[in-house]
Image (tube, helix red, strand yellow):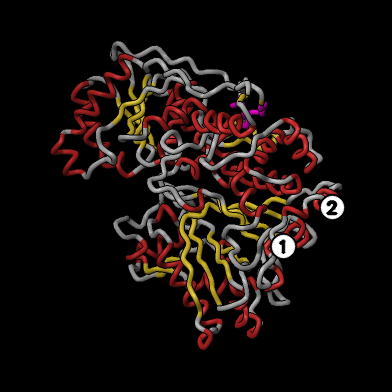
Amino acid sequence: MDSTSVRLEVMSPRGEPPALAPITPVVPVRAWRGKRLGILNNTRAGGVALLPFLLAGLRQRLPDVPIRTWEVPFPLDAEAKAPLLARIAAESDAVIALTGEGGNPTAKTARDVAGIERLGRPAVFLVVQGFAASARNNAAAAGLPRLNVVELAHAVVPPRAEIERLKLGEWAAEALLAALRTGAPEAAASATASDALPVFQGADYSEAMERMEQFFLRHRWSDGLPLVPPRRDAVERMLAGTELPPAHVVGLIEPLGAAATVERIAVNAVLAGCRPHHLPLLIAAVEALADPRFDLQGVACTAGPAAPLLVVSGPAAIDAMNLNTGFGAMGPGWRANATIGRALRLIMINLGGCWPGDTDLKSFGSPFMNVHVLAEREAAYPPHWEPLRVAEGFGAHETTVSVLAAMTWQVDIVQPESATTGSLRELIVRQARAKYDRLPENWGADNLVILSPYAFAPLRRDGISRRAFQELIHGAASLPAREFFTHKAAGPNSGGIPLPQELLERAQGDPAAPVPLLRAPESLKVVAAGAPGPAIFAYVSTWGWGRSYFVTKAVALPRAFERLREGEREWETPAAGGGA
């Protein structure tokens, strides 16, 4: 048989980066007479430790050059940073930025360095070992293809005594000034395939498929699992799941910022194995992911194990899409749960460029990176409990999807003989104290509690409302100031959500003063899921070192949704044991 007898033509899952005017690297600094040097301190702990030693080395080499340090906390949003960067550029002739230590500080400070260069000032970025690629990729996304980077030969900035012993301040001063003198090297050629895909050929369909899979793996367009070919006819069938035009942009997907058009979302949905009636939920999930309040750049690039967790609320769509709410609610077996979550990860890869070592610097990764879709089991609530979507400000008739930057989760069981409101509160509070990162920088983020149906028995018996339950947990989930501020001064945090001044003053005056772990009662999200059985709950803690919130969006179902759903019955997973 002719080896080219089968031709497989597919659509590209990749997106177009934003059309930013490219930044031409600024002329290097050849002489320092009459020049001013600025130090952009992103307030990362390693850079703060290194700074005095670096300043000593710089002043030894540039005794007549004015040097000024500027604090630009890396988690600040772009709008807050803009006037700071403008002032740094106005009052400096060259800028040193430090440090790229940790995924989120590296990603966000790289954008700041690009901003300085766009304002006409040469800049160089000091990063720790292994973080240069992420710095360059994030700067390129901001329009600077040639980022000037100096890489420290350490995975983290060592302690002060080690900095002094190794003379790292002198080394860094010499290396950073040399980089400013020579300028950034030429950018390496990109290995990314173009949108002009070859036609995959083979002796039969299986061979053509294998060649497509190999191509997708080689160019990092895959999550490593077998793929469904995104043929044009399959993508057109997928687009029947929405009334939005294919070119409509749902959002920009960080860190590389490509536009998530409806068509590109549909291509990745096909690739993941979604069905057309899943598309409305996926579109809403992408909208939530791209919302600045979620801070996708930080979540995607951090070295911490944070990844999106989706929570769906609304029984009509949950039933129509055959989402699992019962036994194994976060496990395998249900096409909708598995493929919608997978499609979102593929969108992060193909539109956001989220790839381990390139932009995603997670040390261990996380099971949540295979995005989980949790569907609310609304029937489990007591009569006086509103569903999650209503608690988040949406109508009872609507369907919503929420996204949380989930980092860890811990499951516990309330024994039947002790299943009271008090015991449930005590165990959840224990988890909050154990799982919550006690660094001040990580204070105040939204967290999630998942309750099984039987866990509501004491709340139903005691007439406890959702709000009252949140207040119970918020009031009890605290740590003494001395423990909360371990290894830290009781001062303003450089990242995350700012600690209230009243709380700081109380902690400074009394080491035993309780510091609440939750910003407010409503920052603890509560959802019912899972099957009948013991009173089980899970505490899902979220990511620190940033300002990522629990973001909820409405799902827009097309008018033809019921007809679409009727044609998908054969793809439903049958319920077993009364669990779905």
- The amino acid pointed to by label 1 is Val
Task: Classify 210 as above or below 493.
Answer: above
Q: Which residue in the structure is indicated by mark 2?
A: 562
Please state which of residues 459 and 333 is positioned toward the viewer in this rendering.
333
- The amino acid pointed to by label 2 is Glu
Query: For the stretch drawn in magenta, what is the main secondary structure?
Result: loop
Q: Which residue in the structure is indicated by mark 1?
A: 390
Q: Quadrant of residue 10?
A: top right
Q: In this view of the protein, can residue 182 be seen by the observer? A: yes
User: At 31% across and 39% down in the image, what residue appears?
Assistant: 47
Q: Residues within 10 Å of mark 1 (few under 14, many from 20)?
A: some
Q: How many marks?
A: 2
Q: Is residue 17 magenta?
A: yes
Residue sticking out furthest to the front: 1
Task: Assess whether mark 1 and mark 2 are in contact (beta carbons under 8 angstroms).
Answer: no
Q: What secondary structure is found at the residue carrying circle 1?
A: helix
- Across and down, in percent, residue 71 comes to 39, 38
Task: Classify 185 as above or below 125.
Answer: above
Please state which of residues 303 and 143 is positioned toward the viewer in this rendering.
303
- Across and down, in percent, residue 199 comes to 63, 22
Looking at marks 2 and 1 on the same chain, the residue that comes earlier in the sequence is marked by 1
- Quadrant assignment for the C terminus: bottom right
User: At 46% across and 29% down in the image, what residue appears?
Assistant: 137
Q: What secondary structure is found at the residue carrying circle 2?
A: helix
Residue sticking out furthest to the bottom: 417
Q: Which mark is residue 44?
A: none
User: At 41% across and 44% down in the image, what residue appears?
Assistant: 362
- Across and down, in percent, residue 235 comes to 73, 35
Q: Quadrant of residue 56?
A: top left
**Residue stretch rendered in magenta on the structure:** 7-18
- Quadrant assignment for the N terminus: top right
Q: In this view of the protein, can residue 550 be seen by the observer? A: no
